[in-house]
Amino acid sequence: MLKKLLSKPALLILLAGSITTAAIAADHKAVITHRQGIYDVMAGHMKVLKSILFQKHPKVADVNFHAKAILEAAKHHGNAFPKGSDKGKTAALPAIWEKPEDFKKAGQNLGKALNEFISVSEMADADDMADMQAAFKKVGGACKGCHDDFRNEDDHDH
């Protein structure tokens, strides 16, 4: 009976649909892995900057490099959340897709804070960290602003 119900064309359509679904899921997994990697890079540079600016690591000359590296990684932020990539293991909240203009503005706020931090780090005296620390805190505030509205903080993997 089942054999009669599932003719060859019907079976092919059913198989094509499952293959397409699997391909879409694989594409989303790649997108999610890619964006998580971008944010891992940003977080790594933030940790290094924290060690220099607040824990007295001696590599003050590297501050500008790390700030620019975060900015370069952040440039990929807007393209890292295509529609449908909310499926899978991700801490991205639906607000990213529901409020794309707000999400874009949060990214712009980060870019602005990073550019200000880079400017300060280029002019700052290594003996006086106060200006760099203040500018870095603004970067952290921009990160937090996005996390508060667009990231599930209960998901500690990403």
Image: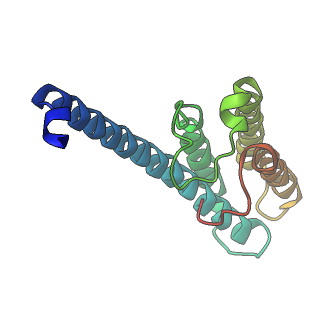
- The x, y position of residue 106, in whole percent, is 76, 35
Q: Residue at x 75, y 50 (%)?
A: 147
Inspect this view and state whether residue 147 appears. Answer: yes
- The x, y position of residue 6, in whole percent, is 18, 35
The N terminus, quarter of image: top left
The C terminus, quarter of image: bottom right
- The x, y position of residue 92, in whole percent, is 64, 47
Q: Residue at x 84, y 49 (%)?
A: 141
Q: Residue at x 73, y 63 (%)?
A: 154
Q: Nearer the viewer, residue 115 or 59?
A: 115
Inspect this view and state whether residue 60 appears. Answer: no
Question: How many numbered circles does the render carry?
Answer: 0
> Extreme front residue here?
1
Q: Quadrant of residue 25?
A: top left
| On screen, residue 29 above or below 101 | below
> Extreme left residue here?
8
Q: Quadrant of residue 47?
A: bottom right
- The x, y position of residue 52, in whole percent, is 71, 68
Is 15 on the left-hand or right-hand side of 25?
A: left
Is 96 on the left-hand or right-hand side of 68?
A: right
